[in-house]
């Protein structure tokens, strides 16, 4: 498709291409598009929309080793959190996993607290603000634009206040629906075990006349954004993007004992190459695979192992007295896997419901959250507890 000629915000001709990160660069987003806006509007968005949004995630950004960014690669942004000293909790300012100040404790002890054994027990995330919802909606809008969705389907939710060609404000008035797991398989995926990897994920999909985008940041902040309700029913739209957040080590590995067929097969599976018993040729294949390795990954690589690790026998035993949950469990497993192949177009777009039907996931999530807000609250707390444990385990 030809490049966009005019900026989506100010409508001026784009004479200089400006790379806009679909997920903000400050959050490690690597996917870029040059067809969304002009440099002036890009700078406006960066200052007024992206900056207050990305600040929310400073606790995570500063705790991921080898965090991947194209700008300000060595910055470790400050954040706030809760610390414990002598069994008492205090609010503190934190940077790079270290407590840099705690006004209440300093006043209480009247001493330099930098030498005290302070334990970080939680990080603060302020999600109850317009900057957060705007940032999530903007990511969904960007992804739809980067996937060449016709702007006429998106324009009703974009409000731009202009004085001539000068942009004064930009608002993304799209409905944002929190995600919560609605079947036993999703509950296990999201809550069983600890956090071992943080990643970003976007899924753009149409159902009936609606266009949705599922946004998952850091495997914790999960939302659906309704971008349009007037998509032609016969226009099937689906796209997904998943990336990890740590820089890839492209150092050539040391391969031992390449004369042993079993060892060669293990390396072949580990690096995703065809095995062969010529040590020089096999080493070349592995080195080429490492050099080409990207942070971009797939839904299948992220979620297939998680689903495969679900202890099916334990679940069946646990749900023996709850046939409805057992029914949902089996239906979800069948929906996500067919002949041992991960069905990515079903993931986060559909969910099995009681009675045997499949429901639109964001619609079902909205209904549950509206009628049982405690369920959403409990899920959100559980996800944040997992994230905080992950962040605090490296704190000093």
Image (cartoon, helix red, strand yellow):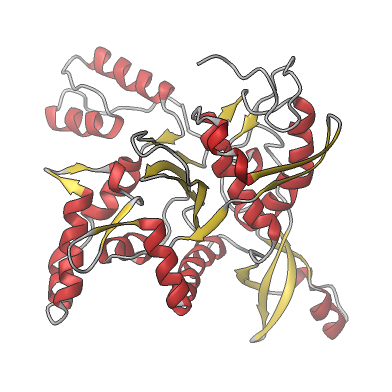
Give percent across and percent down for residue 258: 21, 24
**Relative height, residue 280 to residue 190 (above, below):** above
Between 338 and 263, the residue placed more toward the observer is 338
For residue 289, which quarter of the picture?
top left
For residue 120, which quarter of the picture?
bottom right
Give percent across and percent down for residue 301: 32, 41
Label count reads 0
Q: What residue is rendered at 66% in x and 26% in y?
A: 19
Between 191 and 32, the residue placed more toward the observer is 32
Give percent across and percent down for residue 27: 61, 44
Q: Is residue 325 visible?
A: yes
Q: Is residue 12 left or right of residue 24?
A: right
Give percent across and percent down for residue 153: 53, 37
Between 43 and 175, the residue placed more toward the observer is 175
Quarter the C terminus occupies:
bottom right
For residue 287, which quarter of the picture?
top left
Q: What residue is rendered at 18% in x and 67% in y?
A: 355
**Relative height, residue 143 to residue 280 (above, below):** below
Q: What residue is rendered at 43% in x and 78% in y?
A: 372
Between 156 and 13, the residue placed more toward the observer is 156
């Amino acid at each position: 498709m030809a490049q966009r000629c005019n900026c989506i915000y100010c409508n001026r001709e784009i004479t200089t291409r400006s790379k806009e990160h679909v997920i903000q660069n400050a959050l490690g987003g690597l996917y870029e598009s040059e067809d969304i806006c002009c440099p002036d509007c890009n700078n406006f968005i960066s200052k007024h929309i992206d900056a207050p949004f990305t600040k929310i995630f400073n606790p995570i950004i500063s705790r991921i080793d080898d965090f991947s960014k194209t700008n300000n690669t060595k910055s470790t942004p400050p954040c706030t959190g809760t610390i414990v000293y002598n069994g008492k909790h205090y609010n503190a300012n934190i940077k790079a996993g270290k407590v840099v100040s705690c006004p209440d404790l300093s006043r209480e002890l009247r001493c330099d607290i930098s030498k005290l054994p302070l334990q970080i027990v939680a990080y603060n995330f302020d999600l109850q603000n317009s900057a957060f919802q705007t940032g999530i909606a903007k990511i969904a809008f960007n992804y739809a634009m980067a996937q060449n969705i016709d702007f006429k389907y998106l324009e009703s939710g974009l409000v731009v206040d202009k004085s001539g060609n000068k942009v004064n404000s930009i608002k993304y008035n799209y409905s944002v629906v929190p995600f919560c797991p609605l079947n036993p398989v999703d509950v296990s995926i999201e809550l069983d075990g600890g956090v071992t990897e943080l990643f970003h994920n976007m899924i753009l999909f149409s159902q009936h006349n609606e266009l949705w985008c599922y946004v998952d940041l850091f495997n914790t902040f999960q939302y659906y954004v309704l971008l349009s309700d007037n998509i032609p029913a016969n226009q099937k739209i689906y796209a997904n993007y998943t990336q990890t957040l740590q820089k890839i080590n492209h150092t050539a590995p040391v391969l031992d004992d390449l004369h042993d067929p079993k060892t060669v097969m293990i390396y072949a599976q580990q690096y995703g190459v065809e095995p062969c018993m010529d040590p020089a040729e096999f080493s070349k294949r592995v080195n080429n695979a490492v050099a080409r390795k990207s942070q971009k990954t797939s839904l299948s690589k992220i979620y297939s192992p998680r689903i495969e690790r679900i202890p099916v026998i334990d679940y069946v035993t646990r749900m023996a007295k709850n046939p409805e949950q057992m029914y949902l469990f089996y239906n979800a497993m069948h929906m996500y896997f067919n002949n041992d192949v991960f069905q990515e177009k079903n993931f986060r777009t559909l969910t099995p419901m009681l009675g045997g039907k499949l429901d639109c996931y964001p619609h079902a999530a909205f209904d549950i959250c509206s009628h049982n807000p405690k369920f959403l609250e409990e899920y959100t707390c559980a996800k944040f507890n997992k994230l905080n444990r992950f962040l605090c385990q490296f704190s000093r």
